[in-house]
Image: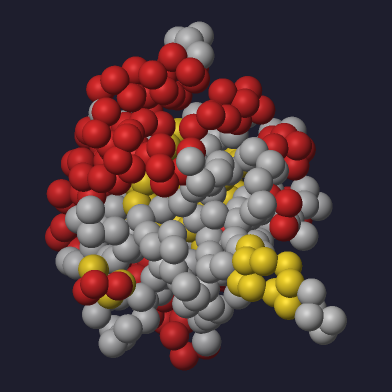
Amino acid sequence: MKIMIPCVSLETAKLQIAAGADELYLGYDTKEFNLLTYNARWRIATGEVKTQVQTVEEFKAIIDYAHERGVKVYLTANANILIPTLRDGYFKYIDTCIEAGIDGVIVSNIGLVKLVREAYSDLPIIVGVNTVTPNVGHLDLYRKYNVKRVVLPQNIMLPEIEEFCKQKDIEIEIFCHIGGGNICGRCTMNHDPLEIDLSSGCRGGFEVTGYDDSYNGACAYLDAAADCSVCHIDRLMEMGVTAVKITGRESNNPMGLSKIVEFYRTVIDAVNENRSVEDARESFREKNKAMWEGYWKPTFCDRDRCRFNETLITRSYI
């Protein structure tokens, strides 16, 4: 099972590959817009953090560095909306990155799948999470366009993932760490995956009061964030999940992100060596005590931010 990691610079590429990344995903800043891009991120995120690779030269340097180490690189071409007047720019964006050596593109809806396949007959296509693929019937549509891989929605549980993995001709990818909402890509709410306690957006808590003044308390009804999947990596590998994805193009802490990658790498390698997830967790804890006690355990374990256990969040899934 591969680990796919976001990248915004050669520096972050080096960190994530050293930590154990098998694949990188990234966007290129064409400087064409004030805020928008041809992928699902604004040019600048919270705190003035750049979410795109800034030059073609650096983009190519990242690809060359990755390929020399057996790591694949995928272009985020998952524009949320692509009106006809922007199509020429969109294709130029892809062409530039093909020339740089990308291994494929990630797109966000069936219209883009059709457009990209008509323009590039052999380019590998990954159908991104914003397409929202809720059942295996959708795969019949993707097969018409020779799709390589599908990223499943965040609010899908293990039995459903297993059904997708039975479709052997299309690779299956899931978000394994940090994520978004129950209707990811469709809610249009402001959010920041790096701020778990954000007061607005799909990850926020909502207090619900009935017309009879009954009070249901606060619950993150729209949250489906894949905050932590470490304890279920062995099950996902057994089912045949091709890749697990970690978010973080908005992160201004690439070193912290690399530690997350290292943890998942430790667990995956342990399972491949017929060791238990518990052994791998203990090994990581011993090596990274400060991170475990100061960040991982209080942020995820103590708050039931587990991707696949039964929690208030998973019980709210529709």
Q: Is residue 206 above or below residue 289?
A: below
In the picture as drawn, the residue positioned furthest to the right comes out as 212
Inspect this view and state whether residue 193 appears.
Answer: no
Residue 318: x %, y % from top left: 77, 60
**Residue located 66% across and 28% down the image:** 239
- Is residue 107 rendered to the left or right of residue 288? right
Q: Nearer the viewer, residue 132 or 125?
A: 132
What residue appears at the point 44 percent right and 85 percent down from the top-left corner? 86
Counting from the top left corner in percent of width and height, residue 184 is at 59, 65
Horizontally, residue 248 falls left or right of residue 176, namely: left
Instruction: Name the one closer to the observer, 286 or 87.
Output: 286
Q: Position of residue 26 (x, y in %)?
A: 34, 57
Q: Quadrant of residue 67?
A: top left
- Look at the image and tell me whether residue 82 can be seen: yes
Q: Does 234 sit above or below residue 99? A: above
Q: Nearer the viewer, residue 242 or 305?
A: 305
Compared to residue 305, the image places residue 32 above or below, namely below
Q: Which residue: 50% across, 14% down?
A: 276
Q: Residue furthest bottom?
A: 85
* 175 with respect to 13 (left or right): right
Quadrant in the rendering for residue 95: bottom left
How many numbered tags mark residues here? 0
